Image (spheres, helix red, strand yellow):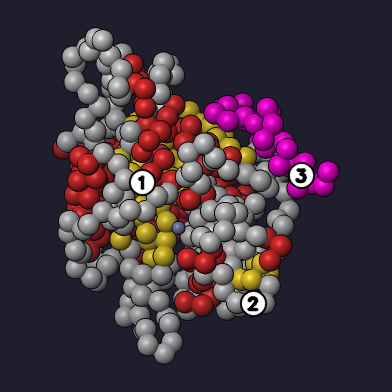
């Protein structure tokens, strides 16, 4: 048994402390060496001080957080990194007596939600499912610092956002794909399309790009055929965003997120990513209850209008888009707890990629602007859920057979 098989056996075995809170003062396990060397990109600009996205920084900030009411390591990655979830608010409710699938069809919706149900709606913000996309990780880290100390790593307070979060039970997973993060650069600012693709989805042994769609031709990516796997998948080559086949969840990270949503009766999810265009919240998936699709679409319109109004996307947003048939982790998160789910794409650098000879960007975002969509999106998403609850779980009638 080589080290990799040993680690795989350990992750699949009974010792995995899923949903086990680390003891006070316990340090995360030392990270293991990466299988592939981190990509080197010559001439990359130095990151600003507030841009904390390295695995050790993520572990340190999470390990020393004390204002959160609860802290869990929801998974260990194939390389052995802990995936942290920090909880803000009251999370003392007993586990559900049934799952959402059964509970939503049972005598009362409270069989899943609890009786009484949680006094506040539960919101999950997960970042870094694709490790090469650091903008939402940077945003999540600054958000944790804000919640812990009253000011983010730039020293900026945001009392309006802190107040909004206090009206929820709020869970933040600052980096779901620690393996991908461990081999990725701190950022992709200023890079052309080719380098962005190489860092994100990697390169085959002949040096050619695996590509965004190309990377999805495999699950997992055949690591013996690549010269660099990109920071998109975890160290086993799995794209966690597509770990969404019911009955065959392949990653500890995906399983940990799904169990997290189910256990804590999550009502809404923000799934934080980045791409090579101006920031936007993606059109929601069509594969969900029709009323949730309509609601998610309306909230995404609201957020995109706010991103545009904040000067972070020069394009006028197109409202009421046609929901898409995509199936991904958002789809199964919606099944796990009934949650409404949205994906934010921050920009990695420009409003559109440098793609010679034709495409030239018109706008280069600053590091502050790269993570600002996280704060705008949370503000609008959370405000919307206070104006009207995210979900109608059921009514107060008790049904009998
Ligand atoms: Zn992504």
Q: At 52% from the left edge and 67% from the top edge, which residue is drawn?
A: 214
Queried whether the magenta region covers residue 15, the answer comes back as yes
Which type of secondary structure does the marked residue at label 3 adopt?
Answer: helix
Please give the residue where the numbered disc 2 appears in the rendered image. 207
Dot 2 beta carbon under 8 Å from ligand 1: no
Q: Earlier in the sequence, mark 2 or mark 3?
A: 3
Queried whether the magenta region covers residue 7, the answer comes back as yes
Please give the residue where the numbered disc 3 appears in the rendered image. 5
Q: Say if 260 sits above or below 276 in the image.
A: above
Which type of secondary structure does the marked residue at label 1 adopt?
Answer: strand
Q: Earlier in the sequence, mark 2 or mark 1?
A: 2
Give the residues in magenta: 1-27
Secondary structure mostly seen in the magenta stretch = loop
**Quarter of the image that includes the C terminus:** top left
* Percent coordinates x, y for residue 239 in the rendering: 53, 53
Q: Say if 303 sits above or below 59 in the image.
A: below
Q: Tag on residue 270?
A: 1
Which type of secondary structure does the marked residue at label 2 adopt?
Answer: loop
Left or right? Give the position of 140 relative to 113: right
C-alpha distance separating marks 2 and 1: 35 Å
Q: At 40% from the left edge and 33% from the top edge, which residue is drawn?
A: 336
* Percent coordinates x, y for residue 354 in the rendering: 42, 81
C-alpha distance separating marks 3 and 1: 34 Å
Quadrant location of residue 288? top left
For this rendering, which residue is in front, 191 or 206? 206
Quadrant location of residue 267? top left
Q: Taking the image as four quarters, which one is ligand 1 found in?
A: bottom left
């Amino acid at each position: 048994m080589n080290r990799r098989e040993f680690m795989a056996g350990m992750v699949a075995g009974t010792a995995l402390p899923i949903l086990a809170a680390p003891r006070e003062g316990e340090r995360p396990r030392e990270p293991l060496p990466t299988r592939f060397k981190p990509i080197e990109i010559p001439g990359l600009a130095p990151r600003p001080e507030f841009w904390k996205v390295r695995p050790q920084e993520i572990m340190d900030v999470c390990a020393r957080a004390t204002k959160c009411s609860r802290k869990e390591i929801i998974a260990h990655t194939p390389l052995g990194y802990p995936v942290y979830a920090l909880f803000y608010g009251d999370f003392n409710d007993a586990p559900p007596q049934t799952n959402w699938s059964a509970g939503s069809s049972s005598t009362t919706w409270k069989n899943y939600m609890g009786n009484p149900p949680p006094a506040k709606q539960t919101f999950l913000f997960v970042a870094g499912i694709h490790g090469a996309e650091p903008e939402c990780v940077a945003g999540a880290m600054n958000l944790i610092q804000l919640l812990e100390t009253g000011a983010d790593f730039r020293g900026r307070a945001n009392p309006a956002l802190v107040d909004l979060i206090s009206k929820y039970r709020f869970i933040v997973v600052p980096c779901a794909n620690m393996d991908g993060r461990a081999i990725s650069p701190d950022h992709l600012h200023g890079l052309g399309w080719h380098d962005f693709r190489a860092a994100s989805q990697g390169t085959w042994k002949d040096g050619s790009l695996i590509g965004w769609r190309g990377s999805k031709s495999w699950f997992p990516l055949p690591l013996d055929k690549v010269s660099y796997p990109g920071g998109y998948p975890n160290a086993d080559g799995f794209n966690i965003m597509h770990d969404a086949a019911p009955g065959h969840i392949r990653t500890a990270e995906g399983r940990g997120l799904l169990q997290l949503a189910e256990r804590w009766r999550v009502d809404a999810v923000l799934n934080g990513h980045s791409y090579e265009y101006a920031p936007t919240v993606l059109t929601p998936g069509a594969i969900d209850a029709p009323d949730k699709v309509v609601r998610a679409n309306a909230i995404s319109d609201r957020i995109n209008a706010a991103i545009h109004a904040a000067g972070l996307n020069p394009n006028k947003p197109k409202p009421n888009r046609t929901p898409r048939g995509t199936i991904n982790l958002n789809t199964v998160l919606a099944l796990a707890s009934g949650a409404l789910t949205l994906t934010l794409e921050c920009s990695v650098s420009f409003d559109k990629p440098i793609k010679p000879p034709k495409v030239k960007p018109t706008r280069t975002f600053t590091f502050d602007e790269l993570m600002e969509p996280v704060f705008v999106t949370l503000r609008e998403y959370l405000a919307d859920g206070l104006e009207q609850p995210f979900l109608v779980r059921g009514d107060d009638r008790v049904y009998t057979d």
